[in-house]
Image (cartoon, grey):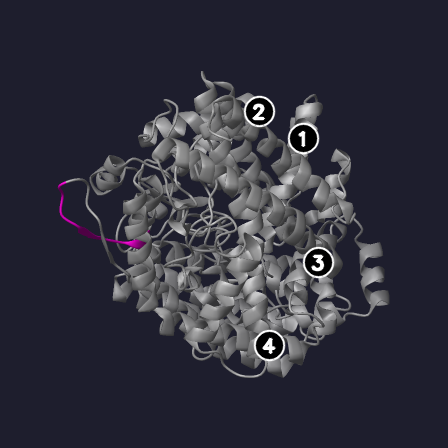
């Protein structure tokens, strides 16, 4: 995913889809929280109840569903492509690229396509008075909704939902536009001030006028609900998934007065503004990167530095980049620690006040996944996944020794490109579009057509530029979207990122028919189209390879991605567990967070000397994983999705006939089906404890075996 993770509205960086559902984006943020009447309000507060969490998910862009973490973190790739950078599930998308590609990225950005938000939303700028006029009208509608339906939902549920839905759509339009526009103007104080002011107003409207809605729906006696459904079986019955989602949060809701106060105060006080400050300051960081041979060093942003590190074929340059990165992040540690203390402290208070039993329970509730299923996933990755991880990096260490003369395998070499074969190292935007379109077309003409629509309709903001949010994401922006934010530098991994985010876009476009309250998929399925999109493009490119060297390079890059999105993301989860567990007894110092990070690295990658010869200059990489701040305990969703999609692809490979239709049906269902029901037609059951180990063996294990065999054949493995 991109360098930045999906975020809840209140956390700032992502566009809302509404309170109404604004909140729902990849926990990817895909978190839905408590009962506040609207999804949006849940987002603003960072609610943790089912409905709130889901709302939050919609609001945040899916990087992509969401955004992705950064390169030193995790990655996704095709050939040498890498999508999800390791910093967070959605981490920065720094992909392997040639030095020349990195250095010319700025020049290329001048001609690469920008999204046309004004055309799609109908506003002339974020400062437009028409936005304020629309919010005036929405406020009147909200007051009317409350006057008409508060205390009367036991007899008037259908008309209440219909009116609420229209309010949700109106709020989503205005707030999504302003949020998206601000993500390309992070260095424009007026733009950020405008966004903050509108979200403050939204919080006030939502808290005062809409809090009752979700709470009363959740508390509605079952007999009254059944009677109304019996009277309107078709019209009200179609909202059953939404109603069930809201009602699941009932045990964790607080009083109407408390929920209202939390929503209204969120933009003015609490963790949201601190997290927003953290994100904005992170985007402003600059580093002195080593220049090409004979060239002077240059000041670059983090994305460019990470791209330079992963693309370099020189171990000394990679090590210098890693040292530069870690040194710069160390100076940022107090900002990151303050934000993470606020987030983990808020999470602790919510867990306590709302009655959640375990650290991840509120996230799991929003994802509609039982705690025990998530625990089984994490256990499988900590054992089987870690074994594959160490086995993979031992293989990579040997290949780099043979191909680059590597003497010591350090963290800076973890995502290094395997320099063999003849595959291109950089791509123009036009070439990237052609690769993704052709890959999609071979699997699903429907998805290929949707992808072309996104490109032709100027729904993608392509270039990497200063003042733009890092990483990549896809925002649903119901009624006007979808929209993709990329930081394209021409690398192969950037192509993978395009395939990933476009999968999210296709998913949204197929599920919009479910309506704003039900189109957004649960977190457990939100990455299905995105990761499957990457997979089909990867397989298409792999089939076109002309040599064993190119095939091995592609396989190693793909395994890089899987390890980063499965093992690394679960390692992030383990770090969060350490921090959040300790936060219950007081704030943590930056040094304590650093020690938790270092302990986690050893737990998932081994002690120094076991696989990696050195963990030098890795102590402060925890500071730039935005998911920790925006969507706590969201990262496991990447592992969940990657392994589910790996199993889905196995089903497709064994029985392609009829698969496309079943997958499109799953995607079109949006949030109307839970993960268990949605996967039944494919014969998959993630609730089976054996599922995760079997998926690791089939998905990661099979690729490992092929890579090891090729490496041995080519003389790269001893």
CA distance for labels 2 and 1: 14 Å
Q: CA distance from mark 3 to mark 4?
A: 19 Å
Residue 87 % position (x, y): 45, 54
Crowd class of label 4 (few under 14; some 14 to 19; many from 20; radius 10 Å): some
The numbered mark, 2 or 1, whose residue comes first in the sequence reads: 2
Residue 443: mark: 2
Q: Are marks 3 and 4 in contact (CB under 8 Å)?
A: no
Name which of mark 4 and mark 1 comes first in the sequence.
Answer: 4
For residue 255, what is the image quadrant? Answer: bottom right
Pointer 3 local density, CA inside 10 Å: few below 14, some 14–19, many at least 20: few
Point out the frontmost of discs 3 and 4. 3
* Separation of residues labelled 1 and 3 (CA atoms): 24 Å
| Spot occupied by residue 102 in the image (x, y as percentages of width and height) | 26, 40
Compare marks 1 and 3 and give the one earlier in the sequence: 3
Q: What percent of the width, then of the height, locates residue 27?
A: 55, 57
Element type at mark 2 = helix
Magenta residue check for 300: yes
Above or below 556: residue 408: below
Residue to which mark 3 is pinned: 375
- For disc 4, the marked residue is 348
Q: Earlier in the sequence, mark 2 or mark 4?
A: 4
Q: Which residue is mark 1?
A: 650
């Amino acid at each position: 995913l991109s360098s930045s993770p999906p975020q809840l509205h209140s956390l700032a960086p992502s566009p809302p889809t509404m309170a109404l559902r604004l909140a729902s984006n990849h926990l990817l943020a895909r978190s839905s929280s408590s009962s506040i009447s609207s999804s949006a309000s849940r987002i603003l507060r960072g609610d943790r109840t089912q409905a709130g969490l889901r709302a939050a998910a919609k609001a945040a862009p899916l990087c992509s569903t969401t955004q992705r973490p950064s390169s030193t973190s995790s990655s996704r790739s095709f050939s040498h492509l890498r999508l999800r950078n390791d910093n967070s599930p959605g981490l920065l998308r720094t992909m392997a690229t040639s030095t020349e590609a990195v250095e010319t990225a700025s020049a290329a950005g001048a001609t690469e396509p920008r999204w046309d938000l004004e055309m799609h939303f109908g506003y002339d700028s974020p400062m437009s008075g028409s936005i304020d006029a629309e919010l005036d009208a929405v406020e009147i509608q909200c007051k009317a909704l409350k006057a008409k339906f508060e205390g009367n939902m036991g007899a008037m549920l259908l008309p209440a939902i219909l009116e609420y839905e229209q309010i949700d759509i109106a709020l989503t339009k205005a707030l999504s536009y302003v949020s998206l526009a601000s993500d390309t103007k992070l260095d424009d104080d007026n733009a950020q001030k405008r966004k903050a002011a509108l979200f403050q107003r939204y919080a006030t409207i939502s808290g005062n006028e809409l809090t009752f809605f979700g709470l009363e729906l959740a508390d509605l006696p079952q007999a009254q609900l059944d009677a109304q459904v019996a009277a309107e079986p078709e019209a009200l019955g179609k909202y059953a998934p939404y109603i069930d989602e809201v009602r699941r949060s009932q045990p964790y809701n607080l009083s109407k007065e408390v929920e209202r106060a939390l929503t209204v105060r969120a933009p003015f006080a609490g963790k949201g503004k601190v997290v927003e400050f953290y994100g904005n300051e992170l985007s402003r960081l600059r580093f002195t990167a080593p220049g090409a041979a004979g060239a002077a060093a240059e000041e670059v942003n983090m994305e460019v530095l990470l791209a330079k590190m992963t693309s370099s074929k020189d171990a000394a340059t990679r090590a210098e980049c890693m040292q530069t990165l870690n040194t710069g992040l160390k100076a940022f540690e107090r900002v990151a620690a303050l934000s993470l203390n606020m987030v983990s402290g808020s999470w602790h208070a919510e867990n306590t006040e709302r009655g959640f039993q375990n650290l991840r329970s509120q996230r799991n509730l929003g994802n509609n996944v039982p705690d025990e299923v998530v625990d089984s996933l994490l256990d499988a990755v900590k054992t089987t996944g870690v074994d594959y991880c160490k086995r993979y990096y031992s293989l990579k260490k040997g290949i780099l020794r043979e191909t680059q003369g590597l003497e010591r395998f350090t963290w800076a070499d973890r995502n290094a490109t395997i320099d063999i074969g003849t595959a291109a190292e950089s791509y123009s935007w036009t070439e990237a579009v052609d690769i993704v379109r052709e890959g999609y077309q071979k699997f699903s003409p429907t998805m290929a057509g949707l992808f072309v629509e996104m490109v032709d309709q100027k729904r993608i903001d392509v270039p990497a530029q200063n003042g733009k949010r890092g990483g990549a994401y896809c925002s649903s922006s119901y009624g006007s979207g979808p929209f993709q934010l990329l930081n394209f530098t021409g690398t192969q991994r950037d192509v993978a990122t395009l395939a990933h985010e476009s999968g999210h876009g296709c998913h949204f476009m197929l599920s919009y028919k479910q309506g704003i309250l039900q189109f957004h998929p649960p977190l457990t399925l939100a990455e299905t189209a995105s990761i499957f999109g990457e997979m089909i493009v990867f397989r298409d490119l792999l089939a076109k390879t002309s040599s064993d060297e190119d095939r091995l390079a592609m396989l190693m890059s793909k395994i890089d991605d899987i390890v980063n999105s499965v093992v690394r993301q679960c390692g992030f989860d383990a770090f969060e567990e350490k921090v959040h567990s300790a936060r219950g007894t007081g704030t943590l110092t930056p040094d304590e967070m650093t020690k938790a990070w270092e302990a986690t690295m050893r737990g998932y990658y081994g002690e120094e000397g076991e696989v990696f010869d050195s963990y030098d200059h890795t102590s402060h990489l925890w500071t730039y994983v935005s998911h920790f701040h925006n969507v706590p305990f969201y990262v496991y969703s990447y592992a969940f999705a990657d392994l589910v999609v790996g199993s889905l692809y196995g089903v497709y490979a064994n029985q392609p006939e009829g698969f496309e239709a079943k997958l499109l049906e799953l995607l079109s269902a949006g949030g109307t089906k839970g993960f268990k029901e949605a996967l039944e037609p494919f014969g998959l059951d993630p609730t089976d404890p054996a599922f995760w180990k079997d998926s690791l063996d089939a998905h990661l294990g099979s690729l490992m075996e092929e890579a090891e065999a090729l490496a041995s054949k080519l003389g790269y493995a001893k």
